[in-house]
Image: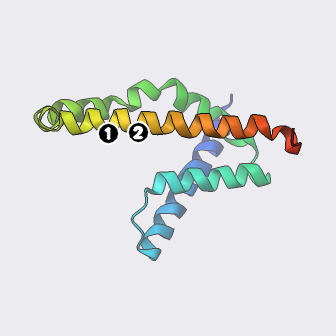
Amino acid sequence: MTPSSILRGTAVLLFLQCISTIVLNLLGLKFPPALLAMLMLLALLLTGTVRVRTIEDVCDILIEKMGMLFLPAGVSILLYLDIIIAESTAIVATIIISSLMILLVTALFLDFMLKHKGGEHK
C-alpha cells in the first residue's frame, strides 16, 4: 500500500462519483449518484477497464473505517426518534414482510439453480 496507489484509487472513485452526478443531473433522473457510480465501477471491473489492483488499497481503507462512516446515520436516528416511534408499526411490518419476501425469492432462486446446475437438466 503506497500513497500513490491510495491516491489513484481515490481519484478513480471520485471520478466515477462525479460522472454519475453529472449524468443524472443532465438526464433529470432521481437516482442515487453513489449507486450509479458503483454500477459503473462494477461494469468497468468486469470488462477489465479498471483493474482491481487500482482501487484495492483505497477500498481496504474505506472498509476499515466503515463504522465511522455510519455515525451520521446513527445520529439521524436519534434526531428523528419521535417519528420512528410514531411509525414503528409500519416500520416493523415492512421489515417483516420484506424479510419474508427476500427469504422466499432466495429459496426459489436456489431451488431453480440447484435443479438446473451448470446448464444441465436433471
Quarter occupied by the N terminus? top right
Q: Quadrant of the C terminus?
A: top right
The relative height of residue 28 versus residue 48 in the rendered view (above or below) is below
Residue 94: image tag = 1
Quarter holding residue 52: top right
Q: Amino acid at mark 2?
A: Ser
Extreme residue toward the front, this view: 122
Task: Locate residue 8 relative to residue 17 in the image: left or right.
Answer: right
Badge 1 element = helix
Q: Residue at x 45, y 75 (%)?
A: 26
Q: Are marks 2 and 1 in contact (CB under 8 Å)?
A: yes
Q: Residues within 10 Å of mark 1 (few under 14, many from 20)?
A: few
Location of residue 72 in the rendering, given as x and y in whole percent from the top left corner: 30, 34
Is residue 69 or residue 115 the one in the foreground?
Answer: 115
Report whether residue 101 is seen: yes
Q: Residue 74 occupies which quadrant of the picture?
A: top left
Asked whether residue 58 appears in the rendered view, the answer is: no
Q: Position of residue 54 (x, y in %)?
A: 71, 42
Check disc 2 and report its element: helix, strand or loop. Answer: helix
Q: Residue at x 22, y 32 (%)?
A: 77
Disc 1 residue type (three-letter): Thr
Q: Which residue is mark 2?
A: 98
Q: Which mark is residue 25?
A: none
Taking the spot 89% from the left edge, 42% from the top edge, the residue there is 120
Instruction: From the top left corner, tell me how far across and down residue 113 is, in percent.
Output: 74, 39
Residue count near mark 2 (Cα–Cα under 10 Å), binned few <14, some 14–19, many ≥20: few
Q: Is residue 87 left or right of residue 116?
A: left
Q: Is residue 45 above or below residue 75?
A: below
Image location (x, y in percent) of residue 34: 48, 51
